[in-house]
Image: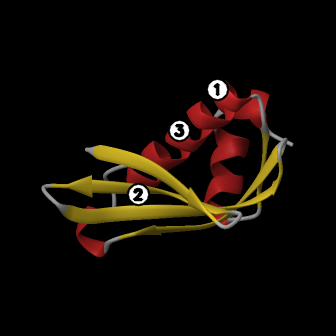
Amino acid sequence: MDITIKERDNKGFAMAREDNKRAGIMTYSIASEELIIIDHTEVEPEFKGKDIGKQLLYKIVEMARERNIKILPLCPFANAMFKKLEDMRDVLK
């Protein structure tokens, strides 16, 4: 699974691809230099149940750690994952 992060115009997204096919996407807004807001997660139907959303979230968490920024998870999926997974709460706003 290849996951890339791209940003443009105060928005960003992490996209998961497998064999040149989009598996899922997680979008976020750049609120400030210290904060991003995850607002949406979408996984393609044929990839459901394969932890694509979790992989996308971990990629964004990794990016947040590298930049020393916090995450506000407004997306219901991301919010639930932060509650469930203790190992990423260090970047939680």
Q: Nearer the viewer, residue 3 or 11?
A: 11
**Is 47 placed above or below 93 here?**
below
Graded by Cα atoms within 10 Å as few (under 14), some (14 to 19) or many (20 or more), the crowding at tag 1 reads: few
Calculate the distance from the C-alpha at mark 1 to the C-alpha at mark 2.
Answer: 18 Å
**Is 85 placed above or below 13 here?**
above
Residue picked out by circle 3: 58
Kind of residue indicated by mark 1: Glu
Secondary-structure class at tag 1: helix
Graded by Cα atoms within 10 Å as few (under 14), some (14 to 19) or many (20 or more), the crowding at tag 2 reads: many
Secondary-structure class at tag 3: helix
**Left of 32 or right of it: where is 1?**
left
Q: Which residue occupies 23% across, 69% down?
A: 46
**Is 2 placed above or below 24 here?**
above
Kind of residue indicated by mark 3: Tyr
Calculate the distance from the C-alpha at mark 1 to the C-alpha at mark 3.
Answer: 12 Å
Place of residue 80 in the rendered image (x, y in percent of width and height, measured from the top left): 67, 53
Q: Earlier along the polypeptide chain: callout 1 or callout 3? A: 3
